[in-house]
Every structure is written in structure tokens, then in C-alpha cells.
Amino acid sequence: MTTYGMVIDLNRCVGCQACVAACKVQWGAPEAESRDWVVPIGPVRDSQGLVSTFYVGLCMHCDRPACVEACPSKATFKREDGVVVVDTELCIGCGVCISACPYGARYFHEQRKKVDKCDLCSSRLARGEQPACVETCITSCRHFGDLEDPKSDASLHLPGSRRLESGDARLGPNVRYLAGDRQWRLIHDRFAPPAPELSTPAWLLSRVARPLILLAIGATFLGQAVAFFTQLRRGEHPIEE
């Protein structure tokens, strides 16, 4: 089984934003949005003096994604290779998954009227290429590959890596980090996600809107069928439009 993931060595990151620029060029994210980001933290003073780092973020492609459960149209799903994707044909742009993601890794694309997010450059993976952010990184701090393959670049850097996950979340993020204890405290204290919990509007959409959507689709087909057979009973020929 394949589980794609990434290990990011924050000891090597210089905050150049080349990965962010490459991603925006590759996927055409709006100016104010991005599929990934690099956030400088610090310098701040701790018991040992000044400390600073960068938070390099993207979709975590979790083992148990909160976004998948929240999506009322089943547009968001997790593939067999571990990549969490959005089917734009099924996405209704409701934004429930955006609220459900504790990492803030999704945004609403105003021009396309769809939700967008990192999919680990799936089209590049299909061609045997690396994600754009990995290929562009000037310090080679991003290590990508199959986490189940002990010979992959990501697996080789797994020892000592950490998951950005609160103790009770159990999301199972497959993007992990290498960082010193001081740097990790900065990131964890600021960006560790809460346990995923759908808000009331999100719960209503996921539990109520989903069956309503399916009911509406079924009603539409039922109405067409009734009209068709009514015409046949009257001896009329249904007209194809």
C-alpha cells in the first residue's frame, strides 16, 4: 500500500517562499490565496535566549481527515495512495470542509466557485515528477515520497520527525516536521490544531443538507419519469429537447 507524505526539515528552511511561488504558478491560486504557505515566527525570547523558526504549511493529507466527514456532497475524499483530493465536479462550494479543516489548508476559489487545496501535485505524480514545492526548494528541506517505502526520501527522514497534532485530535497528519525542541514549541504552541469538531452550521450541512441534496436529485428524476410515462399513457410521443 502506498501512503504519500512529506517530511519538512525546518532546520534547513530559510523562509525564501520559493515553494509558495512555485505552487501559485503551477495551480493558479488567486493573489490572496495559496495551497501552501511559509510563516515566520519570532524571534522571541525563551529561557535560553532568542529563538525563531518558520512554519511551513500545506494540507496534511490526514489518515482520518475531518474535511472528508464534513463534505455534504462527497466531493472531498481520500484516495488509496493517501492523497486527499477535491472532485470539482461534485464540489458545490458550500465551504463546510474549509471550516472543518483544523490546519486552515483550504480556501474558496472565487473565480471557479469551488474549494481548492493542495493535492500533492497529483498530476505531476502521475508523470513521475515531484510536487512543485519539493522540486523548487532551494535548501532541499522538503522530503517527499511513499511513507510505506523504507527507501523513499520521505521515509529516510522520518526518524525524529513530529506531527503537528493535538493530543486528542487523532487526525494522523502525513506531513511531518524535523525541528529542534525550542523551534517546535513555537510552532506547536501557535499552530497545533484543536480536536476537529464541526460547528452547528457545518453539522447541519453535513447531516441534513447531504440527504436533502440526494432527495432533490431523486425528485428531479422521478418527476421526469412521471412525465414520460404520462405522455406514453396518453398516446403521445415524448419529445427530446
Image: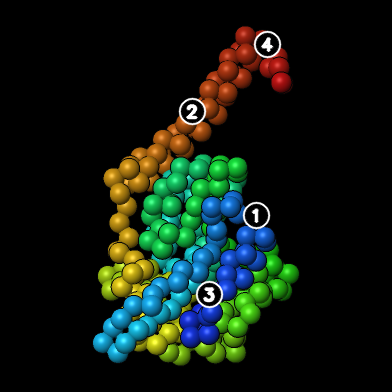
Query: Of marks 3 and 2, which one's residue comes earlier in the chain?
Result: 3
Q: Inspect this view and state whether residue 147 appears.
A: no
Query: Of marks 2 and 1, which one's residue comes earlier in the chain?
Result: 1
Closer to us: mark 4 or mark 2?
2
In the picture, the quarter occupied by the N terminus is bottom right
Question: Is the C-beta separation of discs 3 and 2 under 8 Å?
Answer: no
Q: Quadrant of residue 122?
A: bottom right
Closer to us: mark 1 or mark 4?
1
Query: Of marks 4 and 3, which one's residue comes earlier in the chain?
Result: 3
Q: Quadrant of residue 4?
A: bottom right
Q: Amino acid at mark 2?
A: Ala
Q: Amino acid at mark 3?
A: Gly
In terms of secondary structure, where does tag 3 sit?
loop
Instruction: Identify the residue at image location x=30%, y=56%.
Output: 197
Q: Is residue 182 above or below residue 76?
A: below
Question: Is the C-beta separation of discs 3 and 1 under 8 Å?
Answer: no
Q: Which residue is mark 1?
A: 28
Closer to us: mark 3 or mark 1?
3
Q: Which mark is residue 15?
A: 3
Instruction: Identify the residue at image location x=62%, y=60%.
Output: 24
Q: Which residue is mark 4?
A: 236
Between the residue at mark 3 and the residue at mark 1, the CA separation in whole angstroms equals 21 Å
In terms of secondary structure, where does tag 1 sit?
loop
In terms of secondary structure, where does tag 2 sit?
helix
Query: Of marks 1 and 4, which one's residue comes earlier in the chain?
Result: 1
